[in-house]
Image: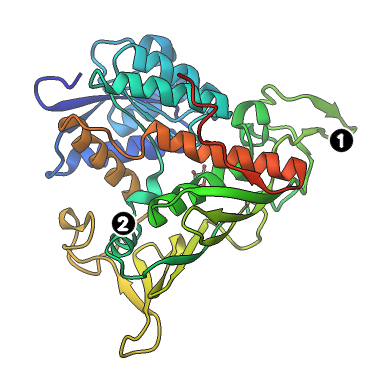
Amino acid sequence: VVSERGKLRVAVIGQGFMGRAHSFGWARAAALEGSRLSPVLAVLCGRDRQALAVHAARYGFAGWSDDWAEVVRRDDVDLVDICTPGASHAEIALAALAAGKHVLCEKPLANTIDEAGQLAAAAERAASNGVFATVGFNYRRVPAVAMARGLIERGRVGTIRHVRAVYLQDWLVDPSFPLTWRLDRGEAGSGALGDLLAHVVDLVRFLSGEEIDEVVSLLETFVSERPLAASGVGLSATAGEAQATGRVTVDDACAVLARLHGGALATLEATRVAPGRKNALVIELNGSKGSLRFDLERLNELELYEVGAPMDGFSRVLVTNPSDPYLDQWWPPGHILGWEHSFVHEFEDLMAAIAERRQPEPSFFDGFVTQAVLDAVSRSAASRSWTTVDRGSKLAG
Ligand code: SOE
């Protein structure tokens, strides 16, 4: 599927926030010398034709289209990068895999556990033909997070006993924030749960190397009615005298108590209504030999505590040395990186896997397992009881 010149011709589907973040990332990846393949921005696909022409030119795409079904079949596309709302992930990803294209799908993999199971099964079949699929959990690619994983793998924190992880945002504090697709269950599947807790769950799995076995959870929607967004797409309005409003059908926040397979206790939280917290993804792990802490708002740093070290305190490691993960291709030590670099690194890892004809990580199966945790969280909140994560029965054969 890789064209002969070692190029990877990419179609990005979606031109919202994430479509643009990916387009930017692919353009940057194309400028890096060390990449295994050279990405070519072949086509940008979306619904708004006017915006498409502008975005396609801005990011350097060769062309654009408003018909994803045509795009995934094109001969001049090797990889389909899906950045649409969750409701369309399954249909687009299945069509792209069937057409023999590699697939990168944004998180959460799907809106339901059944769809995620279908996708994982389809990806496994495609992989046996050398066609690969991966989910966009970009935070695995932040250098400090990759470094944390290496330290944990090498046993520096010992046996993990606690994981404490939160993803906090505040863009829904204002009750006049409009009812966009992210607040519509039909489009987004869920709220803070699928949008933010999905990242938390993936990081817990990635860093600890362990599965989440059982959960007890709370889900809450604090503002249940909001003004209709300009387009009002797909939402049922209850027209008030002053302004039409509609019902929020997803959660604003969730809180989870969980147990990991190795016995560690975990508390996980995600919210869009924590005033002042803009994009605070924080994870702390405490082991028998030490602790690690990462905070996305201080993305170039990792905090490490080692039991018995000469200095009894956390050290703050600035992860910018050329020998640190992903850093050899960037700037001299101390010249820090930003959020968008996580996408560039994600694409580089993906291109290396494709070039070497091996399964990229995280796989669609990883995406399915995360979805199984989200599903258990929903079920637990509904039943108000401890709930086992079902990693098997929903996996379509
Ligand atoms: C919005 O909440 C959002 O853009 C998420 O959709 C992303 O996955 C997260 O990385 C940042 O916040």
Viewer-nearest of discs 1 and 2:
2
Report the coloring of the rendering. rainbow
Would you identify the image quadrant in which residue 124 lies?
top left
**Which residue is under mark 2?**
146
Would you identify the image quadrant in which residue 177 lies?
top right
**Image quadrant where one finds the N terminus:** top left
In the image: residue 384, left or right of residue 44 = right
Question: Which badge, 1 or 2, is on the more N-terminal residue?
Answer: 2
State the residue at coordinates (38%, 52%): 209
In the image: residue 227, left or right of residue 373 = right
The reply to whether residue 296 is in sight is yes
- Local crowd at mark 1 within 10 Å, few (<14), some, or many (≥20)? few
For the residues labelled 1 and 2, say whether their Cβ atoms are less than 8 Å apart: no
State the residue at coordinates (52%, 22%): 88
State the residue at coordinates (35%, 76%): 316
The percent position of residue 386, horizontal first and vertical second, equals: 69, 49
Q: Is residue 39 above or below residue 269?
A: above
Residue type at mark 2: give it.
Ala
**Which residue is under mark 1?**
242
The percent position of residue 372, horizontal first and vertical second, equals: 55, 37
